Amino acid sequence: MKHAITNGNHFFEGSICSIRETCLSDYFKNSIGSGVTIAVIDSGWNYSLIDSRIQNGTGFVDRFDELSLKVNENYFDENGHGTAVTDLILRIAPGTTIIPLKVFGKRLETSVNILVEAILWCIKNKVKIINLSLGTLLDEALKPLYQVCELAKQNGIIIVSAQSNSNEYSYPSIFENSIGVKNGQLNSIFEIIYLHDEATECIAKGFHEDLLYLNGERVKSAGNSFAAPIITGLVALFSQNNNKLDLNEARNKLENYFHFLQDKALNSFVS
C-alpha cells in the first residue's frame, strides 16, 4: 500500500509475448508524447549529442562540492546515468520534450536540499512529468521530500520514481503522491506489470543491452533506474492531447494498459 506522511509509429519496437506491433499501435493510436514536457532529474545530459527534443537544462550541483546546492547553467552529464534515462524515455515517447536537471555530479549521490530545489524548479516551470531514477532510505529525507512531491501533485505534475536498487522501500517511490517503479524480467520495453495495492506499483524492464551513455557509446546495464523511464514514457503517451491528466488518471491508465496486455497475451495463447 502507498504511504503518506501524517501530523510514424516506428517507435513501437519489440513484442510483448506474441503480441504484434499493430496491437500496440492500435492501443496508443498516433500518440508519441507530443506537447508533453518531462523533467529528468538526474546527472544531466551529454549535450555534445545534438537532439532538438532536449531543451537547455539547469544544474543544481556545486562543482567544488557535489553535495552542495548551487543553481547554475551547467547540466552536462559527467556520469552517463541521466543520458541513458533520457534516451530510454525517448524510445517510448519520441515526441516529448525533455528538460535535464542535474542533481548528480560524477557520483550518483546528491543531497535532499538539492533534490527538493530541483522539484521546486519543476513546479515553477510547469513541467508535466518528473522522472526520478533515484531514491533514498534516509529518514531525514522523508518529510521534505513528501512535502515537495505533494506540492508537485497539487500542481498537476506526475512524478515517476524508481525504487532503490537495494530493493528496500525508498523515498519518494513509496509515497502515494508518486508512481513507484522497479525492475522486472520482462521481454519488451512496452511490457509492464501493475500491482494495484503495492507500494511500488509498477514493474518494467530495467535490463538493457544498448543504453546510451557517455561519448555516445552504448553499454549494457540494469537496475530500477532504467525501469522508471519506461513508465515515464508511457505516461507521456497517455498525456498527449490531455494536459490535464493527473496522477490518479495516470495510475488508472497504467492499470488498464496492463489488463490490455494480459488480455492480448491470453488471446494469443488461446488462438
Image (tube, rainbow, N blue to C red):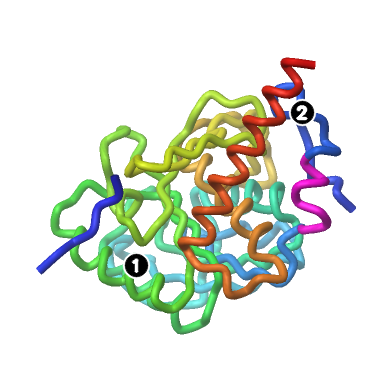
- Residue 205 location, quadrant: top right
Q: CA distance from mark 1 to mark 2?
A: 36 Å
* SS class, disc 1: helix
Q: In the rendering, at what x and y percent does residue 9 appear?
A: 85, 49
Q: Which residues are magenta?
A: 24-31
Q: In the rendering, at what x and y percent does residue 191 appear?
A: 63, 34
Mark 1 and mark 2 lie on one chain; the one further toward the N terminus is 2
- Residue 55 location, quadrant: bottom right
In this rendering, does residue 80 appear at all?
Answer: no
Q: Given the current orientation, which residue lies at the most extreme left position?
A: 7
Return the mark for residue 226: none
Residue 14 in the figure: left or right of residue 100 = right
Q: Residue at x 32, y 55 (%)?
A: 172
Q: Quadrant of the N terminus?
A: top left
Q: Main secondary structure of the magenta part?
A: helix
Mark 2: amino acid: Ile
Q: Residue at x 54, y 36 (%)?
A: 204
Q: In the rendering, at what x and y percent does residue 79 appear?
A: 49, 48
* SS class, disc 2: loop
In the displayed structure, 132 sits above or below 59; it is above
Return the mark for residue 19: 2
Mark 1: amino acid: Cys
Q: Quadrant of the C terminus?
A: top right
Query: According to the image, label 1 marks what residue?
Result: 149
Question: How many other residues sit within 10 Å of disc 2, few (<14), some (14-19) or many (≥20)?
Answer: some
Question: How many other residues sit within 10 Å of disc 1, few (<14), some (14-19) or many (≥20)?
Answer: many
Q: Given the current orientation, which residue lies at the most extreme right position?
A: 8
Q: Residue at x 49, y 63 (%)?
A: 130
Q: Residue at x 62, y 70 (%)?
A: 37
